[in-house]
Amino acid sequence: MTKSIVFSAILIITIGIFFWSMRRIFGLIPLLKPFPIKHHGKRLLVTLKVALGQSRIFRRPLVGLAHALVFWGFLIITIGSIEMVIDGISGQERIFAQWPAFYHVIIFSGDIFSVIVLVSILAFLFRRTFLKIKRFYGIEMKPISKIDATAALLIIFFLMISLLGTNTFYILTRPGHLEEALPVSKILAKAIGPVSIYQANILHEIFWWSHILLIFLFANILPYSKHFHVFTSIPNVYLSRLEPLGKMEHMPEIEQEVRMMLDPEGVKEPSSTQVPGRFGVKDVEDLTWKNYLDSLACTECGRCTDVCPANITGKKLSPRKIIMDVRARAKEKRNGLLKHGQTFDDGKALLRDYISEEELWACTTCNACARECPVNINQPLVILAMRRYLTMEEGSIPALLASMLSNIENNGAPWQYPAEEREAWMRF
């Protein structure tokens, strides 16, 4: 009874802190531009393939397999974690065991996957520490990024240790019970040798509490970590932009301007309290909420930057930095926007204070980054939207591009020759 009361109190505090964090992070969404959601059937197929099937991860087969096994293992182990929470509240033990066929499959899979995840995490730690993978470095990758990644891997490592310890000493407290469904823990129990029931019970409780407290700790660290993608990656894949890559989004602001020119009396005037929309993106409030969700789902893996032709050839652009800058700027401005609304101005902006014009114009819009991202982040959408602002609001564009746009406006083609002279080159 005392255990249930203590556990329930800790659980309530954990959930309270977690939802407070979620409210702060996702409270920004209503202040951002809309993102229409259609074609749910197609979205479900994309989610099954990319998120659950980890299809893009497997483009790098060895590392992809290890990551996929960790992901699938977590899905299985999460069922066991849910059981532990219910056990903690109810004061019972292994409550799902009342459905033996289902339960044996789950705990057997979880026991096997706990070792697979453990080995994979050790490999990831070795790789990050000693192999110096190029894409883990870059101007945007501050020391805190390495600390963040290492801390998360270590927490997962100890989660697996505590899970195996819980199952091992459970077997030792109840010889013969569930042994066949916990093959790895059974081997560990035999390796430990004879232990008194009293000692086994104490060690079982220590590992059980260690595991559950690590889960609670991890859940409340994640919202402030790049590993927040544990929560956001699957929703982000489901909400993927289904239009062809590179197709620019429709701008309601332009439509409004055209309607006002053609029929001034037929267009409803914006209210005095309505914030006038910009052409393109200057700061985070000009983004769609899906652009913001992209930034929250970013794993900082660097696959996008690794395939970016501009970055490969020494340009300043890093698609990963673009998304990380969106997240950093949103975090910086979030409290002000939540308190004062979209009119809040802190004297800074995403453009220039975080992302330079040089970075934006270096992009070739090849969309290699968007194709490579394992969680379907669309980096070029942010770049193109910011270019739109530079072009349409400031007229701040490279001279050659200005000439091309002028020719398109006047001649209907990028070249400076009028339509009637387009065949003149054949005369020479």
Image: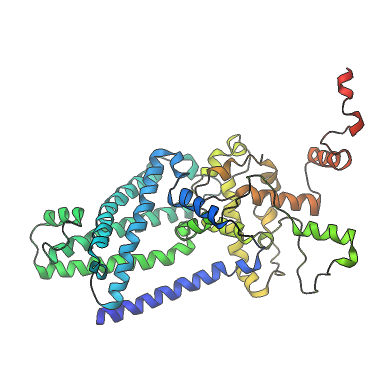
In front: 300, or 133? 300
- x and y, in percent, of residue 173 in the image: 13, 67
Q: Report whether residue 325 is seen.
A: yes
Counting every numbered tag in the picture gives 0
Most extreme residue toward the right, as rendered?
Answer: 420
Going by the picture, which residue comes out furthest to the top?
428
Residue at position x 36%, y 56% in the image:
74
Residue at x 29%, y 69% (from the top left corner): 84
**Is residue 99 shown above or below 112?**
below
| 154 lies left or right of 171 | right
Which of the 4 image quadrants contains residue 198?
bottom left
Q: Position of residue 281 (x, y in %)?
A: 71, 56
- The x, y position of residue 122, in whole percent, is 32, 48
Q: Position of residue 248 (x, y in %)?
A: 70, 49
Q: Quadrant of the N terminus?
A: bottom left
Color encoding of the figure: rainbow
- Give left or right: position of 67 versus 20: left
Name which residue lies at 71% across and 47% down: 357
Residue 142 in sight from this viewpoint:
no
Left or right of residue 157: residue 297: right
> 399 and 365: which one is in front?
365
Residue 204 is drawn in which quadrant? Answer: bottom left
Quarter of the rendering occupied by the C terminus: top right
Residue found at x 39% / y 52% = 71
- Viewer-closest of 292 and 340: 292
